[in-house]
Image (cartoon, coloured by chain):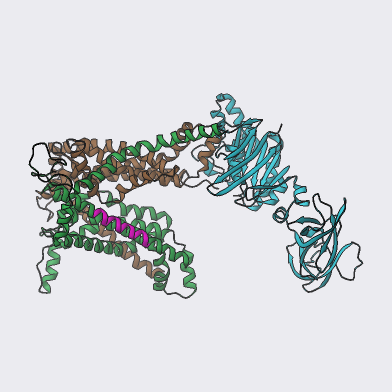
Chain colours: A brown, B cyan, C green
């Protein structure tokens, strides 16, 4: 047992190193006083300064934030409804529509939405089309999280509420919603992260007018790599790290409430 | 007028009939039990009384009023669930005050009644705890308190003791009887445990495959099972194939192949030539040395085939001359004595004429 | 009596409609309809300057390429180049899946066998880099594999000692594979861990007790029981890799084109929408068959496990 554990530990250490070294390098080079991502030339904050003076980058960040907030709001409301509906009723069509966009390659959703926006809606691509596209693929993630929580709960809790005199709406407001709230918030945070990070679908549904963060980063990587990319990358990592800490705190507190466990004694 | 009247209720799930034309009435103040193996339809029936499910045909009347179309929240009926179904995000007090709030009681009234309810189940100091901070028995008592706090006309209990261990279960049984006596609410109790049903109930309805087999007091159910299912499901019983050869108002004479005649008490609707079984409870069978004087008319010789020692009593399985087995129960009344007979011993078995019953096919 | 039942049924239907209606409507409009549009588009003629030719010939126009046509599909099957790209994409997806499995299995096993209080943290450490921006994770490898990086110098020094090289690491099939594995690794670890965590450790004790060696315990017990996790992890890696265009686009050279890049070019490069749609349909079919196969394998693996 001991020896096999040692072997597992070394294999795992290699994998963890593989996961973290690249990101560490990006962070380190964001403070490197050199235009080249090759050698350490001393500490500087100039790339961050350049970033905050880059008007287009700031607009892109603002646009991405607006998109992520709108899309995660829409996806959270619709995804929670979908998760509840799929858990409670025997539905055939809705689960397929909800879960397929999560499972298939993003490029397919991007392409079909591009064709749809241009041909049917005659929509000028821009913020609206991106928000719709992001909402579409985030609904599934929220629904999965909400449904998983519902599946972990004792169904008779909801019957007990009705039995004790609560109407459908009272049952939802006083029992169902408080119990699934951690899942709803986790779903919202996940949607926000997915939306602000998404490149592929944004790439297909973007317009020409407004700069969007992932597209901006893509252009910088493809066209002219400057250490400003390292700086924006580091900031984005910090943002997602904060989101994840909040999400796991929520999960943790939910678990310690004993809500996620079935109340069977 | 009965408090609860179930009239010819049928419920089907696809081609499967869960409840088949069942009629039962429950009186006010009664502790009524639906007893049967899993899948017999008892829980389906309970869910229809609560309003979670609807009969395909038939009526459910409460105080003479048809409950059809009345949603669960509008019925003066509460349920105690097998899993307790306490709201995990609410304290014990909030759980208990839930039905009062839904009914629109004033905050002052709610507070005093919650205190009283907590007191009733001996949990006065637990009001601010959350369900996950309670033991199984405490959760159980909160569920009772919540179900009873606004005095429903009827409390439905769906195997509420099923999740408890054996010892706690026995304690809760006694508590449950006292609780029902104190609050005076009518209970409809669902269980598959026959000893629980016998211990708690005023009346029992034995159910099997969607049908009610017998409705009676516990002692009648045990002593005079109406058919082979009830006899077999409740307690232990020996059954030997028999044929009716004589009927009188007071007794039946049965012929048992290769053994001879036995006498049992009479039963309505039985005529000469009916086939069936002679059924007898182990504790009613006397086991003796073959040389002992014969005092009872129903007396046969046999061989001890097997025995089972469980401490207080030993059950002997005696093989009779025709190959039939009959069980006899003997208390181990002498200290340190595990058994009075060995496997292979020749013994006599006998029973009173009013002990055996005839169950036709 | 029946009236009451009808009323309850009606209420149930209204509640069901209120909950499932909005997401259903949204997804019909923004997922089902676009998918159908894509199918339709694959059967149309391309427009003269990109986009599409009209479905119906405009009044007074000379007869030409209007209406529906299987031309895009014919074009796909007439050129062996496209079949090769599909084959290559499957190869890259299979290789990525296999490498991810080899890297993820020991890690998932270690997490599953660690003390309970460490498990969540160890899983979080796997997911954490995955939560950083997708492009940044690819970009990080541009730095590492770049010609002036320490890693490149080291590799070429080693190769040089054996009289080989020098090689360019960036913009190569190797860089594409590294990027693919890096981006998809967590998708393999999570389902494997979820499966391995549920294993009853007394099974291994029983096997040890019955005289199985460490290797036998793994090969005869842990591995067959983990097959459902392996298959769901494989599907979660294989399917997105199949449609990936950003990794080859950023880390690959001009020759490293996969299905995704081909599709992207039809919409944002050459602007041949019908052909791009047809390629997307072919990709969808490939994904569906892979998903179906994985489900079937996972099911039969579970079946054989239950039989044991």
Depth order, front residue of C66/B301: C66
Asked if residue C291 lies in the magenta stretch, the reply is yes
Do we see residue B58 in this rendering? yes
Do we see residue A53 in this rendering? no
Depth order, front residue of A253/A127: A127
Depth order, front residue of C273/B107: C273
Residue at x 55%, y 40% (from the top left corner): B53
Image quadrant occupied by the N terminus of chain A = bottom left
Secondary structure mostly seen in magenta is helix
Residue C194 placement: quadrant: bottom left
Q: Is residue C226 above or below residue A224?
A: below
Depth order, front residue of B114/C134: C134
Task: Classify residue A225 as left or right of residue C90.
Answer: left
Task: Classify residue A117 as left or right of residue A36.
Answer: right
Q: Is residue C128 above or below residue C80?
A: above
Q: Position of residue A205 (x, y in %)?
A: 19, 41
Q: Position of residue B150 (x, y in %)?
A: 61, 31
Numbered marks: total: 0
Residue B59 placement: quadrant: top right
Asked if residue C81 lies in the magenta stretch, the reply is no
Task: Classify residue C215 as left or right of residue C103.
Answer: right
Q: Position of residue B123 (x, y in %)?
A: 61, 38
Task: Classify residue B182 as left or right of residue C41.
Answer: right
Q: Which segment is the magenta one?
A: C283-297
Q: Position of residue C137 (x, y in %)?
A: 21, 52
């Amino acid at each position: 047992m001991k020896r096999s554990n040692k072997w597992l530990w070394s294999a795992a250490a290699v994998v963890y190193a593989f996961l973290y070294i690249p990101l560490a390098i990006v962070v380190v080079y964001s403070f490197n006083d050199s235009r080249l991502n090759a050698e350490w030339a001393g500490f500087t904050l100039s790339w961050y300064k350049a970033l905050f003076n880059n008007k287009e980058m700031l607009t892109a960040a603002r646009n991405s934030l607006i998109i992520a907030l709108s899309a995660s709001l829409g996806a959270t409301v619709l995804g929670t409804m979908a998760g509840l509906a799929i858990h409670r009723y025997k539905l055939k069509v809705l689960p397929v529509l909800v879960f397929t966009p999560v499972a298939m390659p993003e490029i397919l959703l991007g392409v079909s939405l591009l064709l749809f926006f241009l041909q049917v809606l005659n929509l000028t691509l821009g913020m609206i089309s991106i928000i719709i596209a992001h909402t579409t693929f985030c609904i599934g993630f929220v629904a999965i999280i909400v449904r998983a929580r519902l599946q972990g709960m004792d169904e008779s809790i909801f019957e007990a509420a009705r039995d004790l005199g609560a109407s459908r709406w009272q049952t939802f407001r006083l029992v169902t919603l408080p119990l699934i709230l951690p899942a709803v918030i986790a779903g919202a945070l996940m949607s926000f992260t997915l939306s602000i990070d998404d490149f592929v679908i944004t790439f297909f549904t973007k317009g020409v007018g407004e700069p969007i963060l992932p597209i901006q980063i893509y252009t910088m990587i493809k066209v002219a790599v400057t250490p400003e990319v390292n700086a924006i990358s580091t900031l984005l990592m910090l943002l997602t790290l904060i989101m994840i800490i909040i999400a796991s705190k929520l999960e943790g507190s939910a678990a310690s409430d004993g809500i996620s466990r079935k109340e069977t004694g | 007028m009965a408090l609860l009247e179930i009239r010819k209720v049928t419920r089907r799930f696809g081609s499967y009939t869960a409840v088949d034309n069942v009629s039962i009435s429950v009186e006010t103040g009664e502790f009524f039990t639906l007893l049967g193996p899993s899948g017999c339809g008892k829980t389906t029936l309970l869910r229809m009384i609560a309003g979670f499910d609807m009969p395909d045909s038939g009526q459910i009347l409460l105080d003479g009023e048809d409950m059809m179309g009345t949603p669960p929240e509008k019925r003066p009926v509460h349920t105690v669930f097998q899993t307790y179904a306490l709201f995990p995000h609410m304290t014990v007090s909030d759980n208990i005050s839930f039905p009062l709030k839904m009914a629109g009681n004033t905050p002052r009234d709610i507070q005093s009644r919650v205190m009283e309810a907590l007191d009733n189940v001996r949990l006065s100091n637990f009001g601010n705890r959350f369900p996950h901070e309670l033991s199984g028995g405490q959760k159980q008592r909160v569920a009772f308190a919540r179900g009873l706090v606004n005095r429903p006309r009827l409390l439905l209990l769906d195997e509420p003791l099923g999740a408890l261990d054996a010892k706690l279960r026995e304690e809760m049984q006694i508590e449950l009887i006292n609780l029902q006596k104190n609050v005076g609410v009518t209970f409809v109790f669902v269980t598959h445990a026959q000893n629980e049903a016998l211990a708690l109930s005023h009346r029992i309805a034995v159910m099997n495959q969607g049908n009610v087999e017998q409705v009676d007091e516990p002692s009648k159910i045990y002593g005079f099972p109406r058919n082979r299912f009830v006899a077999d499901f409740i307690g232990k019983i020996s059954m030997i194939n028999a044929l009716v050869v004589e009927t009188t108002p007071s007794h039946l004479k049965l012929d048992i192949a290769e053994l001879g005649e036995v006498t049992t008490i009479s039963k309505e609707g039985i005529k000469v030539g009916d086939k069936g079984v002679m059924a007898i409870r182990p504790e009613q069978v006397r086991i003796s040395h073959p040389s002992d004087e014969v005092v009872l008319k129903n007396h046969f010789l046999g061989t001890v085939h097997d025995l089972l020692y469980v401490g207080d009593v030993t059950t002997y399985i005696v093989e009779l001359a025709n190959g039939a087995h009959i069980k006899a129960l003997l208390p181990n009344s002498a200290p340190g004595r595990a058994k009075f007979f060995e496997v292979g011993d020749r013994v006599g078995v006998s029973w009173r004429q009013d002990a055996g019953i005839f169950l036709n096919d | 009596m029946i009236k009451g039942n009808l009323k309850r049924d009606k209420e149930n239907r209204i509640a069901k409609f209120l909950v499932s209606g909005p997401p259903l409507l949204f997804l019909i409009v923004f997922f089902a309809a676009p998918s159908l549009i894509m199918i339709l588009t694959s059967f149309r003629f391309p427009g003269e300057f990109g986009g599409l030719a009209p479905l119906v010939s405009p009044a007074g126009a000379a007869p030409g390429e209007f209406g529906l046509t299987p031309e895009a599909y014919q074009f796909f099957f007439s050129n062996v180049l496209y079949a090769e790209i599909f084959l290559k994409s499957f190869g890259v997806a299979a290789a990525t899946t296999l490498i991810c499995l080899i890297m993820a299995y020991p890690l998932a096993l270690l997490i599953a066998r660690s003390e309970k209080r460490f498990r969540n943290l160890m899983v979080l450490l796997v997911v954490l880099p995955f939560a950083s921006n997708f492009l940044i994770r690819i970009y990080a490898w541009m730095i590492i594999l770049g010609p002036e990086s320490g890693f490149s110098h080291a590799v070429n020094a080693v190769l040089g000692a054996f009289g080989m090289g020098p090689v360019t690491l960036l913009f190569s099939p190797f860089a594409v594979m590294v990027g693919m594995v890096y981006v998809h690794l967590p998708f393999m670890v999570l389902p494997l861990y979820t499966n391995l965590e549920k294993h009853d450790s007394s099974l291994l004790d029983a096997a040890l007790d019955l005289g199985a060696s460490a290797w036998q315990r793994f090969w005869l017990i842990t591995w067959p029981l983990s097959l459902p996790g392996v298959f769901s992890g494989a599907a979660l890696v294989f399917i997105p890799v199949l449609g990936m265009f950003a990794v080859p686009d950023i880390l690959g050279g001009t020759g490293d084109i996969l299905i995704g890049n081909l599709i992207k070019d039809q919409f944002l490069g050459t602007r041949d929408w019908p052909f791009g749609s047809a390629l997307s349909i072919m990709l969808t079919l490939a994904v569906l068959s892979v998903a179906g196969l994985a489900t079937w394998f996972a099911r039969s693996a579970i079946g054989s496990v239950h039989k044991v």
